[in-house]
Image (cartoon, rainbow, N blue to C red):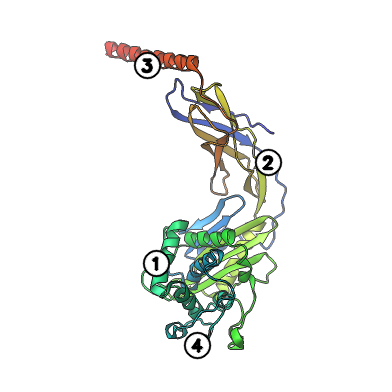
Amino acid sequence: MQTYMPAAVGCSHFGMLGTAKALVRISLAVVGLLFSSAASADEFAPAVRSISVYDIPSHTVMLEQNADVAMPPASMTKLMTLYILFEALEMGRVQLEDRMAVSAYAANRGGSTMFLDTRDNPTIEDLIRGIIVMSGNDAAITVAEGLAGTEGAFTLQMNSVAQRIGMEHSHFLNASGWPEAGHEMSARDLGALALSIIEEFPQHYHFFSQPEFSFDNRAPANRFNRNPILGLNIGGDGLKTGHTDEAGYGFVGSAVQGNRRIVFAFMGAQDANARAQIARDIVLWAYGQFRSRQVLRAGDILAQAEVWLGEQRTVPLTVASDVTILLPTSSPDDVQAMLSYLGPITAPIHEGQEVGHLSISLSSVETTHIPVVAAENVRMGGFSVRISAAATVLANLAMRHTTSFLTQEEE
């Protein structure tokens, strides 16, 4: 177990709560080579209207631009339709081999299509592939009607799930992404939805990397997955493209290399070729310009926090899990971490109890905030401890009163 001693600590005294901070220094020698093909964020970020890039293992927002601006998401909407379908599969409401009827409304929706007609009874597995690979509006509506009766009723579920996930800048009016005033999502929300799918439904995520699918061989020319980073040998394995005249070309994607996975979303690219190039550049930038490094282990002692009314005067603080951060490969910085908690911490204190947070900052990425917990139990002190604490508080109050009186007499 490694102990990180604070360079400076400020604590409140005599039982009066205040914010205590400890400056924890972590220095790393980072060795890494730049990928010559990795673009700079300055090259691809201006080419889109909004973007969000997130590194999952380090919980780091790598890049954001207009990330909370709501725009028409087009077929990227279908990720929410799939999320609800995956949830229904996990709850046992439906099975992959179950079949769904196709309504005339679904069959006649138009736009990107799985080429269903009202005589079809596709399996749910077929519909999943039809939504992901063929981007079928008819498939999305068939799922919505099969799960909720009507597309309108299904959109109520979509908005409810969006609130539950924390998608604050999204509103759904249909299941397919058909252009409709008020139907919109933000890049940050798209990334959050993609992350939820990846983490909650790993057993179904493989569908996103299927390169082609043709339902009943009806439209061979439309059988290819539109995902621009599949097959590039850069780890791309999901998720969904979208396009509207208003919002331009968008994509929410994910890639994994080694033990690092990123999720990103952008909207407003000029055309499909630009979308493909931007998606590739994001992946090369994220993995070429940054390396993931573990800087703390679970149980490492960060500081000793002052305790109020406890059997012992201090409690060691730690992190509950290993802490990994991103460091730039071109110009690594010293990592600066600031430990903050409200102290003194009142006993009783339980091991694992969250008492503050550790803010880890570098100049090149957004500050990361990690929960800090007590490393051991501290029981409440006995009668003598409480008497001593009360006497200390009274003495402190008396000192303040005397100081105030003298100041008034001087005036």
Which quadrant of the view contains residue 145?
A: bottom left
Nearer the viewer's eye, disc 2 or disc 1?
A: 1
> Which amino acid type is shown beneath numbered disc 2?
Leu
CA–CA distance in space, label 3 to label 4? 81 Å
Ranked by sequence position, the earlier of labels 2 and 3 is 2
Residue 351 placement (x, y as % from top left): 58, 34
- Which quadrant is home to the N terminus? top right
* Residue 387: image location, x then y, percent: 45, 14
Q: Secondary structure at mark 1?
A: helix
Lower sequence index among marks 3 and 4: 4
Q: Nearer the viewer, mark 2 or mark 4?
A: 4
Whether residue 69 can be seen here: no
- Return the disc, 2 or 1, that comes first in the chain's sequence: 2
| Disc on res. 28 | 2
* Cβ atoms at labels 2 and 1 below 8 Å apart: no
- Would you place residue 208 above or below residue 24 in this image? below
Write the residue at 48% across / 78% down.
142
Q: Is residue 369 left or right of residue 325?
A: left
Q: Secondary structure at mark 3?
A: helix
Tell me whether circle 2 and circle 4 mark residues in contact (CB < 8 Å).
Answer: no
Residue 223 point in image, percent of width and height: 61, 82
- The residue at which mark 3 appears reads as 397
Which of 233/385 is in front?
385
Kind of residue at disc 1: Leu
Residue nearest the viewer, comparing 335 with 18: 18
Separation of disc 2 and disc 1 at Cα? 49 Å
Which residue was labeled with disc 4? Answer: 117
For mark 1, does the 10 Å Cα neighbourhood hold few (<14), some (14 to 19), or many (20 or more) residues? Answer: some
Say which quarter of the image contains residue 99. Answer: bottom right
Q: Which residue matches tag 1?
A: 156
The answer to the question of whether label 1 and label 4 lie on touching residues, with beta carbons closer than 8 A, is: no
